Amino acid sequence: MDLFFDLLRSAIYGVIEGITEWLPISSTGHMILAEQVLKFSFSAEFMEMFRVVIQLGAILAVVVMYFKKLWPFCVDNGRDSGLAKHIRWPVMRLWGKILVACLPAAVLGLLLDDWMDAHLYNSVVVAIMLIVYGIAFILIERRPRVPTTTKLSRITYKQAIIVGAWQVLALIPGTSRSGSTIIGGLLCGMSRACASQFTFFLAIPVMAGASGLKLVKFLAKGGVFTLAEISALLVGCIVAFVVSMLAIRFLMDYVKKHTFTVFGWYRIALGILVLGMLFPATAAEGPAGKRRITQQTQEYIRRFRERFVDRDCADLLKRKDLIPTGQSRDLGVADHCGILIVSAVEILCDYIAELKGE
């Protein structure tokens, strides 16, 4: 009976992964909520690996759906001779840009994986990043803009590097890998559809690498798979694959006619919900609890304005005197929006640490 319920929980995890990996709403934030309800009978070491390796099902969905756009070989390209005639050069160039965009996150992810798990994989950080990037989506969509890049073939190496830099921020749990790369794509001139597709393709090497790293670490620590664990992992991956197919189709149809604003508001609501789960006593305090939260919010805004003076996105983007913090430099973030997001999180983390100390 325990195995049946574990497989059922794995299927639910697969649904969550399949939806939240591709929509810019943070799979980690939803996993944390799910973990409050879904209690597996497996070891903590297996679950740490399971949360990441289940992504393989989601990756396979991208490969299957976009195989023709991603496969770089053909019988005859009609232009070259010898071995070169079997290569689809536009696809090969696209893969070059994908690999360039993946390098920053791959290097830092390998170096900081254990540190991130130890220091940042917690509900407070996830809630903060949900809210911060929710606000970022809303502000970016309010800016008038005309996309300069509407096709994958038009993406430049410079744009790929910018998107790759934004992907580094996704190492922070709760950010959403798709969310950060889509924001990066929008800011450097891509259309919503183009940024979304490029994000899907970036996921293939990044998520495959992350899954492989977790699997190797699990085995290196002496981990051994039981039949129940293998079954749960397979069920989770298969469900994630099927649901990912549906989620990707939905997102590509959605962005043709709509903005990402609704996802921004959803992220903010989810972040508040996660914080509410962390501080349930606030609800029991009634009006006094609401006044306290209001005061703390106002204090956070005061601290942000104390550092940056401005609060309006348009005014902040005009600033020429923004200096990357140590954390920004560690993450390889040097653009305006990246510096502001990292700084906003640092201010909030410091303030929460003070409140906990009280």
Image (tube, rainbow, N blue to C red):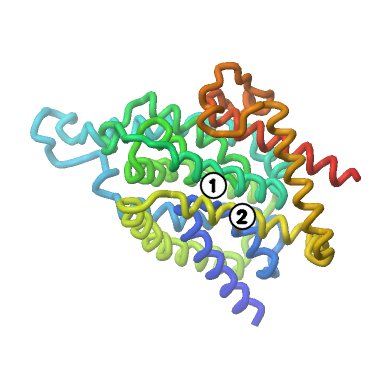
Give the residue number, with chain letter if any, for mark 2: 29
State which quadrant residue 13 falls in.
bottom right
SS assignment at label 1: loop
Provide residue 82's location: percent of width, then percent of height.
Answer: 14, 28
Q: Is residue 351 above or below residue 325?
A: below
Which residue is more in the foreground, 168 or 103? 168
Provide residue 177's location: percent of width, then percent of height.
Answer: 51, 44
Q: Is residue 156 left or right of residue 10?
A: left
Mark 1 / mark 2, whichever is N-terminal: 2
Q: Residue at x 42, y 60 (%)?
A: 244
Provide residue 355's location: percent of width, then percent of height.
Answer: 84, 45
Given the current orientation, which residue lies at the most extreme bottom position? 1
Q: Is residue 326 above or below residue 260?
A: above
Assess disc 1: are there few (<14), some (14-19) or many (≥20) residues with their C-alpha within 10 Å of its C-alpha: many
Q: Is residue 100 left or right of residue 78?
A: right
Instruction: Name the image quarter holding the C terminus.
Output: top right
Instruction: Name the image quarter holding the N terminus.
Output: bottom right
- Asked whether residue 46 appears in the rendered view, the answer is no
- Asked whether residue 269 appears in the rendered view, the answer is yes
Q: Residue at x 81, y 65 (%)?
A: 286
Give the residue number, with chain letter if any, for mark 1: 176
Residue type marked 1: Ser
